[in-house]
Image: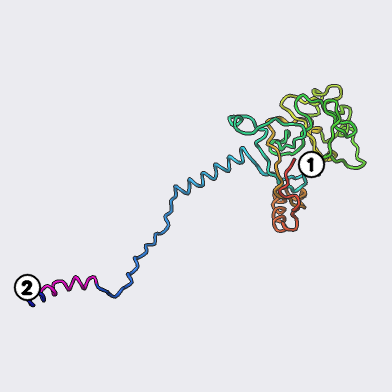
Amino acid sequence: MMDDHSENNISEQVQPLAADIGPATWQRPEPAPVKHHAPSFDGQSLLQSMFSVIIIALFVITFLVQAFVIPSESMEKTLLIGDYLLVNKVPFNNAGPWGEVMPYRDIQRGDIIVFHYPVDPREHFVKRVIGIPGDHVRLRNKKVWVNGRQQDEPFAIHLPGSYEPYRDNFPAPNEYSGQVDRHWRTDMMGHVEDGEIVVPKDRYFVLGDNRDVSIDSRYWGFVPKQNVVGRPLVIYLSVDGQGSSDEEPGRGRASQSVHTLAHIWQLARWNRMFRLIP
């Protein structure tokens, strides 16, 4: 048997452990300090992102689409002055390694195309293809004939009561127009057979839909295949009041742009926006 002294010793020895597992007052632990890291500037990552954006933009502009604005009435009523277009550059550019993977096709009669103006390649024109290589084309009393067949052209418009022999009965070697390019005046006769103009290889005969005001293949000749940029795809913006300015060209365009931006809600032709071009 243990004596009282021994029991007291054991009790004293185990009390601290018993006290450790007993109830105690709970205290909220202090939160760990939050470390704020200043954002690091990674110049290399920024340059890589900028370079990627530039590469994508160049690819899109070079191979896919490009923006243009209609500056004249030569394609009314199909395209109006102030129509902003996205031009699809894919369909006709079948040169190079992309020809195996991109959906290219040949240019066809009736296609609307954007191209570098043959007389001054710095300018871009938009017209409708009437004749493709090998076609025989002529106009008689404003009606278009291709390969001996009169064409049905619901898109073509004419000025009432307007008649010019050279323009409306093309080719008309014995008629004269002061708007004819001098090089075309000489070269044209080499392409005329039996009163028809014969479209040579890799060339296209184009006309504007607004036939009586359009300066087109009748006045400066064929469009070389390599001059073709693409086909208008969609009108993404259309703004009224975008006619030519009598001011100095650079300043006139700048002031016109400022005016357009300031009055965009009043000038916008909302019913033409995002209209697909057939």
Mark 1 sits on what residue? 75
Where is residue 74? Give x, y as percent. 80, 41
Of 35 and 172, the residue lying toward us: 35
Where is residue 251? Give x, y as percent. 70, 51
Under circle 2, the secondary element is loop
Circle 1 crowding by C-alpha within 10 Å: few under 14, some 14–19, many from 20: many
Colour style of the rendered protein structure? rainbow
- Is-magenta flag for residue 11? yes
Of 16 and 135, the residue lying toward us: 16
- What residue type is disc 2 on? Met
- Is-magenta flag for residue 19? yes
Mark 2 sits on what residue? 1
Q: Main secondary structure of the magenta part?
A: helix
Query: If the image is split into quadrants, where does the N terminus sit?
Result: bottom left
Instruction: Answer with mark 2 or mark 1, whichever residue precedes in sequence.
Output: 2
Distance of label 2 from label 1 (alpha carbons): 122 Å
Quarter of the view holding residue 27: bottom left
Magenta segment: 9-21
**Residue 170 visible in this rendered orientation of the protein:** no
Of 179 and 199, the residue lying toward us: 199
